[in-house]
Structure formats: C-alpha cells, structure tokens
Amino acid sequence: MREGEKLTVNNQPCIVLNGVAKKYRSGRYVLRQIDLEVPQGCVCGIVGTAGAGKTTLVRLLAGLIRPTKGKVCIFDQNITPDNPAYRQLASFILNDSTFYSRLKVKELLQWMHRLYRHWDEKRCYSLIQGLDISLGKKIKQLPHEQKVWLSVIIALSARSKLIVLDGPTKRFSPAEKMDMLKLLSQDVINHGTTVVFTTHSEQELQEIADYGFRLEGGQLLPCELKRGFRNEAWV
Ligand SMILES: Nc1ncnc2c1ncn2[C@@H]1O[C@H](COP(=O)(O)OP(=O)(O)OP(=O)(O)O)[C@@H](O)[C@H]1O
C-alpha cells in the first residue's frame, strides 16, 4: 500500500480514519499514517504482534487519547476525548477493563438500563440466563471470562451499532471464544452491527473476519482472507 492511500472496503463507513498518526510524549511514532474506512455490518479484524499499536488504535477510536495528526470519525462524528456523543452508538471492550467492581451484576445492569436509550431488557436477561451469570454476585467476584461476557452482553443489550474488542478473549478456551464470536456474528447479521477486534493470531483473523488488516511498522496493511465470518454452519 502506498503512503496516504485509503483502504476503502465499502461505501458506507462506520469508522473513518484519515491520516492518523500517534506519538506518545515519551517516544517514537507508534502509528504513522493510518487511512481506513470500515463499513457498517461487518467484522473487521486487526492482527499485530505485541507492541504493534493495536491498543493505541482502539484508544483513539474510543476517544481516550487524541491523534498527533489526522482525524478519527465514527458514524460521521469527529472523535476526541471531549466528544462523547457517539457513546450511545459504540461499545469498547478493552483488555484491562476492571469496571464498576464493587457493584453487583444486577445493579450494574440497572445502571446500564438507565444509561442507554435503546436498552433491550428482555435480550439482556435472556443472555445472562443462558450464560449462567449470577445477578447477586459483585463484579469483582466474577472470573475474568464472565466479566468479558458481561461486557459483551451489555454491548448487545445497549444495541450498540459498533462493538470494539481489544484482545479480551486472550485467556478464553477456543470453544468459549467461538461461542462469543457466534453470538456477535448473529448481531452482525440480524442488526447490521459492526464488530472490530484485535488479535495476535492470524488464524483467528482468518476464521472470523470479513475484512482483515495487519498493523506493522505503524501502518495498516490489508490481509487476504480465505473465508469470512459468516460461515453457513454458524448461523
Ligand atoms: N501511554 C504510553 N506512553 C508511552 N508509550 C506508550 C504508551 N502506551 C503505549 N505505549 C507504547 O506504544 C507501543 C504500542 O503499544 P500498544 O499497547 O498500542 O501495542 P499493542 O499492539 O496493543 O500491544 P499488545 O498486543 O502487547 O497489547 C508500545 O511500544 C508501547 O510501549
């Protein structure tokens, strides 16, 4: 890919990155020139080795940090730490999320219900029951896997149009990882949700993504995929 060339994967983008570069105060450019459009209703995977800049990219999408250069847009809105307007539309499930640990599961869900305009209560409780998550337990008492599931359930119940996962399934068994991806794939198909995930695994990208990119040397390079997420056997 030539510098400055845009990776356009569809005409109706959910995410648009224009000339994005990021340099932390203490160091070198982690991201150099990212130009990307991700369409709505697809699964987009980003693979990269440790330190390639995946979390930095996700934190830019989440508006947790500012780009040094360029512009980050989600659903046509310019994303910065002081523009939280898109948050009714997007959910970010980060690697190190240790959220609301003192609340009970039930209290957290009640809070989320108040927070999200399009909250789907019926769906939420049916997912919770299916996964056997105890409503009376405090978040801090849940094992890591259940915390990640809970984040996914919240994103799905909030009817998020964009769900971004930054390596949260690292400690999952292959079967459990597949269950989560099947659940997300159904949302992509039924509701046109866009799912973006980061991974260290080229194989995961091959198995799951509709569009795949490799983050290397601060740039995003397109990956050729052998098959898409929406394998008939899964849906
Ligand atoms: N706040 C920060 N200040 C300075 N440097 C940082 C900061 N955050 C990350 N970095 C550096 O930026 C580079 C990219 O880090 P990042 O966490 O984005 O990579 P990653 O691809 O997500 O890695 P991993 O797969 O291990 O999570 C690393 O060299 C890291 O040390």
Image (tube, grey):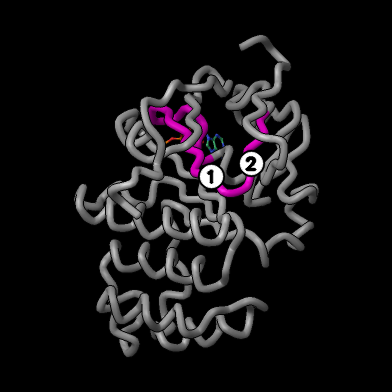
Q: Residue 190 or 160: which is nearer the viewer?
A: 190
- Disc 1 crowd rating (10 Å Cα; few below 14, some 14-19, many 20+) is many
- The residue segment tinted magenta is 36-55
Q: Secondary structure at mark 2?
A: strand
Out of 199 and 26, give the one closest to the viewer.
Answer: 199
Residue type at the position of mark 2: Pro
Q: CA distance from mark 1 to mark 2?
A: 7 Å
Task: Name the amino acid type tagged 1.
Answer: Cys
Residue drawn at point x = 39 percent, y = 70 percent: 150
The circle on residue 39 is 2
Ligand 1 has an atom within 8 Å of the beta carbon of the residue at disc 1: no
| Quadrant holding the N terminus | top right
Decide: marks 1, 2 in contact (CB < 8 A)?
yes
Q: Residue at x 46, y 22 (%)?
A: 223
Based on the picture, tell me whether residue 54 belongs to the magenta stretch. yes
x and y, in percent, of residue 88 in the image: 67, 67
Single out the residue that lies furthest toward the front. 232
In the depicted structure, whether residue 69 falls above or below residue 2: below
Residue at label 1?
Answer: 42
